[in-house]
Structure formats: structure tokens, C-alpha cells
Image (spheres, grey):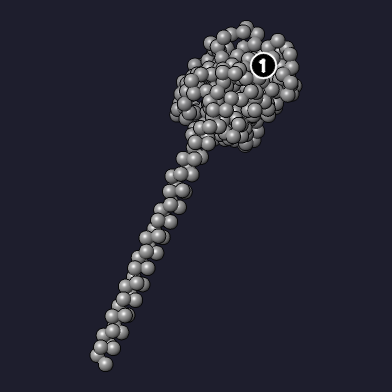
Amino acid sequence: MMKRGTKFIRKVVADQGGYFRLYASLTVLATIVVSVLVYQLLVFRPFQAQSERRQAANIAYKELQLFPQSLPVLPNIFYELWVDTADNSFSLGKFQLVSSQLVDAAGETISEGIFSLPEEIENVSGVHMTISDRATARGAAIDFLAGTINNDRVVLTFNLFDPAAVTAEFTMATPTDNNSLVNEKSGIWFGDVIENEPKLFMPQAPNGWAYEGWAIHEGRTLTTGRFKNPQNADLFSGFSDVQSAGLDFPGEDFLKNPPVAVFPGLVFPINMGGQEVKITLEPDVNGVDPTGAGPFPAVIFSAEIPNRADAFQLIEMEPASQNDFPRSTVVFR
């Protein structure tokens, strides 16, 4: 009887050992499978995708097509399109936008907005667009739109200014007449007039650009002046009085010399209650705006003044979004 019991126990132990070995084998196999899956997901596939992107970057494109979208019509300006590679930038020539047609520097229509590419253009990384003065053919090109390539496509955006990172406020006042009791709603100053503190918290204008303030009164657009440094006075005082000096930050009084040649019947002073105020980025070539006297379509701040707003009251401006700026799209083939 003892022998039979011992034999049975040995058999059970042997069987259990087999189960343990099988369990251990399955555990090792599962570990291997999981390791392979992790490698595929975290290492191999990203590397493969990166390799595919590199191969795509080496494509030698033959042409590109430009879709103007919200590209502004600027009669006095040449646009110029540049294809960027890792080592160089290639110009595809200057052109203008006439109605909805692209026209080259010789006046010929660019059919369907298609530009041929030189054979040496490979490893395309992106595209950028510049603007220059058409009338004087100045060589200085101003950076305008830019973008990187993604699936044979480049979305060109105005990325010279980030409106999300800045703030702006202004007050209605007329400090240059040396009288704080009359006509105070006939001036716009981008700061706290009482405390004499600037309220434009944004960087200096990018190279080739200048800020410009605008008062829009009953549909008539009046400049408050251009400036590079938002913490300093602007470069214009043509509408202000001379009884007292202007302030040390951008702004203008609308008290003298109304531009009746442009706006017949305009009389100063004006009441800016219920009107609009804007700040734009303007092209700047040696202090001259090659696009003309009006606002350039890159409005970075705007505000509607309440009808009952008081003089000397700080009014906050609304920043633009990137979707408000000019843009266009390029497709490579």
C-alpha cells in the first residue's frame, strides 16, 4: 500500500513540474511577443515613417501651382515666390495679382498659377513669398508669407506677428491743445494719457515692417502715425495742435489740417465715440510704405469705441487671429 501511495505522489509531482515548465515557456513566449509589438510600434514604424518622409523630400518636383486665396491685390507691389531647400532658396520670378489672375513682371498671365521649377531644385523644405516696390524696382525684398512642405503642399501664412502674445489699450484725449476740458474725444493715444504710460505690449516691428495706428471715423480712415517701437512716440503729428507737445507713446489728436483732398467735407475736431480704431503692420522700405497710404490688410488689433465711452478711459483692443491675415497655398507636382 505504501509503495502505491509513493508512486502516486511521484507522478503528481512530475505532472506539476510539467505544468510549471509549460507555464514558464508560455510566459517567455508572451514576453517575446510583447517585446516585438512594442518595437514595431515605438521604434520600427516611426523610423519607417521618417525614412518615407526623407524619401519624399528627395522628390524632384517639376512644377508648382499657386492658389492666391486671400492674397491682397496690391497695384504698386511685386510679389516674388521662393522655393526653399536645405541649402538654398530659388526665385520663381516676380508677379502681380490682377483681379483673380497672376501676371508676371512682363505682363503675361501665369496660366492657372503654375510655375515651372528648375531641375536643380530637390529636397524642398518649404516656400516663402516676398514683396517689393514695383514703381521704383527697389531691390529690397520684404518677407511676407512662408510655410513648410507637408504632403506636397505648403500653406503660406503671415507668421511675422503672434497676436496671442500681445495686448493693446488706448484712450481718447487731446493733449496737444493744452486743454483737458474740450474736444477730448477727438484724439486717440495708445496708452494711459493721465499716467503718461504706454499700453502697447508687443515687440518692435519685424525687419521691413512698421506699425501704424488708424482712427476710422464715419468710414474715413485717418492715420495716427507709424512707429517701429510701440513704447515710443510715432513719426507723425500732422493733425495735432502745437499748444503742447505730444506724448511719449504713439497717438494723434485730430484738431488741425483735416485731409479734405482725400475726404472732402471733413472737419476737425471729430468725435470718436462709436467709431473704430485699428493697428496694422505695414511694409516699410527706408521709412516709405511701398503699398500706399491706406491700411495694409494685416490688422493686428481692432476695437469699437462705445458711444458712451468717456475721454481718458482705457479701452482694450481685440487681437487678430492668424485666420484674419493674408494666406495662400502652393501644391507641388
126 with respect to 26 (left or right): right
Q: Secondary structure at mark 1?
A: strand
Residue visible at 51% across and 19% down in the picture: 88
Q: Considering depth in this image, is 241 or 322 the residue closer to the camera?
A: 322
Is residue 108 visible in the rendered structure shown here?
A: yes
Q: Residues within 10 Å of mark 1 (few under 14, many from 20)?
A: many
Measured from the top left, where is residue 70 in percent x and y? 67, 28
Measured from the top left, where is residue 327 in percent x and y? 63, 29
In the image as oriented, which residue stretches furthest toward the left? 2
Q: Considering depth in this image, is 258 or 301 the residue closer to the camera?
A: 301
Residue visible at 62% across and 8% down in the picture: 137
Is residue 216 visible in the rendered structure shown here?
A: no
Quadrant housing residue 188: top right
Where's the N terminus, which quadrant? bottom left
Quadrant housing residue 298: top right
Quadrant housing residue 16: bottom left
In the image as oriented, which residue stretches furthest toward the top? 136
Measured from the top left, where is residue 293 in percent x and y? 64, 16
Q: Considering depth in this image, is 284 or 134 the residue closer to the camera?
A: 134
Residue visible at 56% across and 18% down in the picture: 120
Residue visible at 49% across and 16% down in the picture: 245
Q: Considering depth in this image, is 332 or 212 the residue closer to the camera?
A: 332
23 over 329 or under it: above or below: below
1 over 70 or under it: above or below: below
Measured from the top left, where is residue 110 in percent x and y? 72, 18
In the image as oriented, which residue stretches furthest toward the bottom? 1
Where's the C terminus, which quadrant? top right
Query: How many discs appear?
Result: 1
Question: What's the amino acid at mark 1?
Answer: Phe
Q: Which residue is mark 1?
A: 95
